[in-house]
Image (spheres, rainbow, N blue to C red):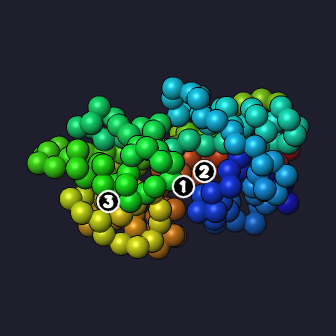
Amino acid sequence: MQQLVFATNNAHKLEEVQAKAGDKIKLLSLDDIGCYDDIEETGLTFNDNASIKSRYIYERYSLNCFGDDSGLEIDALNNEPGIYSARYAGKHGDHDANMDKVLEKLKGVENRKARFRTVISLIWNGDEYFFEGTVPGTICTERSGAAGFGYDPIFQPDGYNITFAEMSMGEKNSISHRGRAVGQLIEFLNTQTKA
């Protein structure tokens, strides 16, 4: 089984990606490799931030790894919160405050179109590859559902009448931005590991 470092300690992300990867790949977290550094996301794009994480690990540990950056882009807010999605309301990872800010900014706004975007930077044997997944949807007027994390309770993907937070992990993974990007990553890794 291939081992691959996922440059995160986010248990939700690890669980989602491991579920998609199945038993072909064993994901290792930053904790698993003894990396306790806070890797600062100083880039201006999702690609920049994903690359910062994967390069940081590869340069210090010489392990194949990938980093990701994801966010919510809302048309009516000029694609905010974008790369600032995790800290939109100020404090990193305060999901309730972030959702409150989005809902407040969209009060009375008709165009609620949005998309979740994930970019993955994979460093495989020294070479860098990018994979991207998006899922279009709508921002609801209130929270619904208790599963998932982040903005899941206010995001309804196109073609569904429920939010990400009302879906099972399997349902969400089959259509999510991260699921789509990870699908491309797994396909690529399958071609590499056959050789």
Q: Which residue is mark 3?
A: 154
Choose between 75 and 142: the one closer to the eye: 142
Label 1 packing within 10 angstroms: few (<14), some (14-19), many (20+): many
Decide: is 119 above or below 160. Answer: above
Q: CA distance from mark 2 to mark 1?
A: 5 Å
Q: Which residue is mark 2?
A: 182
Quarter of the image for the N terminus: give it: bottom right
Quarter of the image for the C terminus: give it: top right
The residue sitting at 47% across, 62% down in the picture is 149
Q: Give the x, y percent position of residue 48.
A: 59, 28
Marks 1, 3: nearer the viewer: 3
The residue sitting at 54% across, 55% down in the picture is 179
Marks 2, 3: nearer the viewer: 3
The residue sitting at 51% across, 70% down in the picture is 169
Horizontal side of residue 35 vs 150, given as left or right: right
Q: Earlier in the sequence, mark 1 or mark 3?
A: 3
Choose between 132 and 93: the one closer to the eye: 93
Q: CA distance from mark 1 to mark 3?
A: 19 Å
Residue 180 seen by the camera: no
The amino acid on which the numbered mark 3 sits, given as a three-letter code, is Ile
Q: Earlier in the sequence, mark 2 or mark 3?
A: 3
Q: Which residue is mark 1?
A: 179
The residue sitting at 53% across, 34% down in the picture is 46
Q: Give the x, y percent position of residue 82.
A: 42, 38
Residue found at the very far top of the displayed protein: 44
Q: Classify residue 121 by image quadrant.
A: top right
Q: CA distance from mark 2 to mark 3?
A: 23 Å
Label 2 packing within 10 angstroms: few (<14), some (14-19), many (20+): many
Number of labels in the image equals 3
- Callout 3 secondary element: helix
The amino acid on which the numbered mark 1 sits, given as a three-letter code, is Gly
Q: Give the x, y percent position of residue 56.
A: 76, 34
